[in-house]
Amino acid sequence: MWALGILLLAVSGIAQAQNLPLGLYEGLMGNSGVATVNSSAAAYYNPSLLRQRTDNAFSLNGNTLGTSSTRQGDSTFSSSLALGPSYLSTILVGTNLVHELFLATTMQGQFNWVTQADAQNFFDAELNINRVVSGYSMAFQSVPLALQVLVRYSEVKSFGLAEESNTATGISSVTKTKTEFKNLNVALGISTHFQFDHYTFGINLNTRGIGLYNVDKGSSKKYEHTPTEYKVTESDSGRATVVNEEGKLIIGHGFRVGNHELLTDSTFVESSGALNRYQFTQSFGYRYGPQEGHQVLCGISHAFGADVNYFGQSFNSSVGYSWSSGKLRSAIGLYVSRENTSIDTSNAGFIFGSEYEY
């Protein structure tokens, strides 16, 4: 059935296209942060940067309020305005080690998927999608090295109705579909950075995940009416999955002179839907302002690959402003992303968050 195939293709593809901004600073700089100074989301970008922290801290940052819309042929995948935390963390600074527990939401929300091949064939589904990564990071104070344990979880639940009719044969049907997908895996990470007077070089490597828990089930019930009979058919053929990150390597460079900081990261990501194939993304971020004062931030990242033919075909950009009040630093900003390759996706939203040191 064409409706069931749509669910599998849609959710897998759209999950890869979503790029939420993460981090109080990094999310406002096009998700650049592997070689930054004063990182606000080190556990996600480069845990080795925790070595720079001198105070304990609690972060509730990178919260986003936004919408997304995707078109693929006769299909539309969209979400309404949604609010959700995208990065939570607790940093504890010890004598020999710096620890961070974190939770990052890379995709979350209620989505609607509609496909209309013609006036007689229609499919409408509601989906609840969540994809998060959590873990523990441990950075050494004496050497620029950090180790990490990552727990990745993704889930999607859907309910859809398909209507099909053929006036020539007089056959019409209504199909009800339900799917549920859950995946939990654990991975390891190692990272380092080297900092000089005005230059920082960083590397973060994450391994593939080892599966701990997986649920993949679906059901459909078809009510079909023909000129001679009426029948009901049940099956378990419906499926919907969410693509997870697997192996990931990020190499970053940071340049800081006075109040100016320029970052560039090269990211290679392997997904669960295409093992041994890496998506390459290059990002650039800029920050102006003193470390303890008001700051202006902006950035852009762009994906490259066989399906990307020109600059601007697959990008993510952001801009924002950050300020501090004592031990509390806050930030606000906007982000926009667009992909026009095999699918046409656009996302936009508002970023806000805070970090408190104690």
Image (spheres, rainbow, N blue to C red):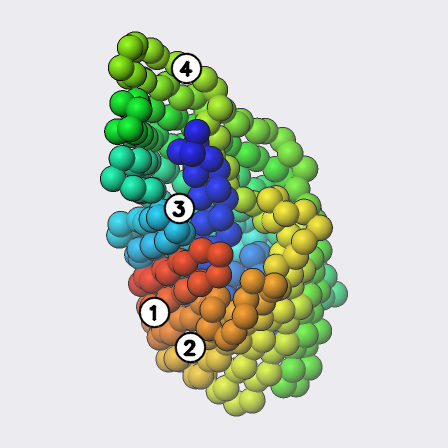
Answer with left or right where residue 96 lies relative to residue 219.
right
Report x, y in % for residue 279: 61, 59
Disc nearer the start of the sequence (1/3):
3
Disc nearer the start of the sequence (2/1):
2
Disc nearer the start of the sequence (3/2):
3
Query: Is 232 situated above or below 104?
Result: above
The mark closer to the camera, 1 or 3, is: 3
Query: Is 269 situated above or below 13?
Result: below
Check disc 4 and report its element: helix, strand or loop: strand
Residue 53 appears in the figure: no
Answer with left or right where residue 28 lies relative to residue 52.
left
- In three-dimensional space, the C-alpha distance between marks 1 and 3, rounded to whole angstroms, equals 19 Å
Q: Which residue is label 1 attached to?
A: 333
- Can you tell which mark lies on residue 108? 3
The C terminus appears in which quarter of the rendering?
bottom left
In the depicted view, which residue is nearer to us: 291 or 243? 243
Q: Which residue is label 4 attached to?
A: 234
- In three-dimensional space, the C-alpha distance between marks 4 and 2, rounded to whole angstroms, equals 54 Å
Report x, y in % for residue 317: 42, 71
Residue 68 appears in the figure: yes
**Identity, as a three-letter code, of the amino acid under mark 1:** Gly
Give yes or no for contact between labels 4 and 3 (Cβ–Cβ under 8 Å).
no
Q: Residue at x 37, y 60 (%)?
A: 346
Query: Is 68 situated above or below 38?
Result: above
- In three-dimensional space, the C-alpha distance between marks 3 and 2, rounded to whole angstroms, equals 25 Å
Answer with left or right where residue 345 lies relative to residue 152.
left
- Can you tell which mark lies on residue 294? none
Disc nearer the start of the sequence (4/2):
4
**Identity, as a three-letter code, of the amino acid under mark 2:** Leu
Q: Which residue is label 2 attached to?
A: 297
